[in-house]
Image (tube, rainbow, N blue to C red):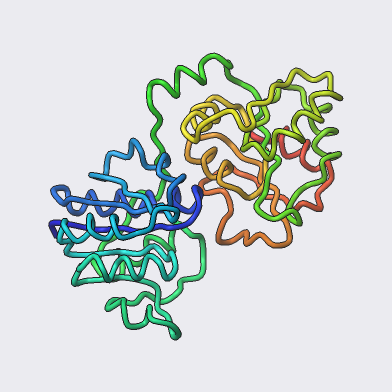
Amino acid sequence: MNNILLFKLRYIGDVLLTTPAIRLLRNTFPNADITMVVNKGTEDILRHNPHLNRVLTVDRANGTWPLIRALRERRYDLSVDFFSGDRAAWLSLFSGAPERIGLVSNAGFRRFIYNRQVPWVPGHAVHLYLFPVEHFLGLKVTDTSLELHVGADDDQFAHRYGSGFVAIHMGARYPVNCWPRENWLELVNRLAAPVMFVGAQKEATDAKWILQQTKTPAVSLAGQTTILQLAALLKRAALFIGHDSGPMHIATAMGTKVIALFGPQSDVPSWRPWGEGHTVLPTSSSVEQVIASALHCP
């Protein structure tokens, strides 16, 4: 296997959960040229990944024809779509790869595009993404840990903020999955540790509201970090508390214990924090229950 093409056109957490499968392919084919295609804005998750030769992005604002030309020039032997949707299927076809692995589909053109179709496997997304390469290439995974590497400049950025703090991420993709803002305020007031709010710009307003009302030592970097700066910060955190989200998965990849609040539209078996020692609570949980979980984190 000389040239391998991979796709994951979703969000940062989805891309991160493919890293065990990427590592398995590299360990199996150490001399292969491996390309990963992701959505623009998620590529930092793989920027320093040692198992990839290159990361290409789908920039929908500028069209996909330049990407298609770049893919065809590489003459890939195999493409693997880690279940991304129709766009990845068409890119797989247009790449010219003779072997195309993707999720089985009974409707649309995907059932004709993929000549190696993988059935849906219930369970965590990590195993779902590993299954295509295990099933069709006869591989066996021994290491399912997530892998996220930061640069020296990211570590330098994080070093300025110390360590041992509780990182809080109040954002969620769907508002119905969010814990009430008043609960976050009470939680911060009762935590016996400094707090750092993290996330995107949309979380900055709620973080500012809490900072104006609490006497707990706290700082907000919501909306002020890159993905890799966030990863470097979370590596230095004593605990992460947040919703089912990309930052939650980043925290687990960086070895930080997680208390994850999952709302009614969250799929716990598929998206729970990966690894041992983490806690999952419903968003119906009280502040007391979250505090109790925090006290029991090693």
Q: Position of 131 compared to 77: left or right?
A: right
Which residue appears at 27% of the width and 71% of the height? Answer: 93
Which residue appears at 16% of the width and 51% of the height? Answer: 32
For the view shown, which residue lies furthest in the front direction?
62
Which residue appears at 41% of the width and 21% of the height? Answer: 153
Q: Nearer the viewer, residue 196 or 131?
A: 196
Quadrant where the N terminus sits is bottom left
Q: Position of 21 compared to 196: left or right?
A: left
Q: Is residue 235 above or below residue 170?
A: above
The x, y position of residue 148, in whole percent, is 41, 38
Which residue appears at 64% of the width and 31% of the height? Answer: 222
The x, y position of residue 174, in whole percent, is 69, 55
Q: Is residue 106 visible?
A: yes
The x, y position of residue 182, in whole percent, is 86, 39
For the view shown, which residue lies furthest in the bottom direction?
106
Q: Position of 205 compared to 84: left or right?
A: right
Q: Is residue 298 visible?
A: no
Q: Nearer the viewer, residue 23 or 157?
A: 157
Quadrant where the C terminus sits is top right
The x, y position of residue 199, in whole percent, is 62, 36
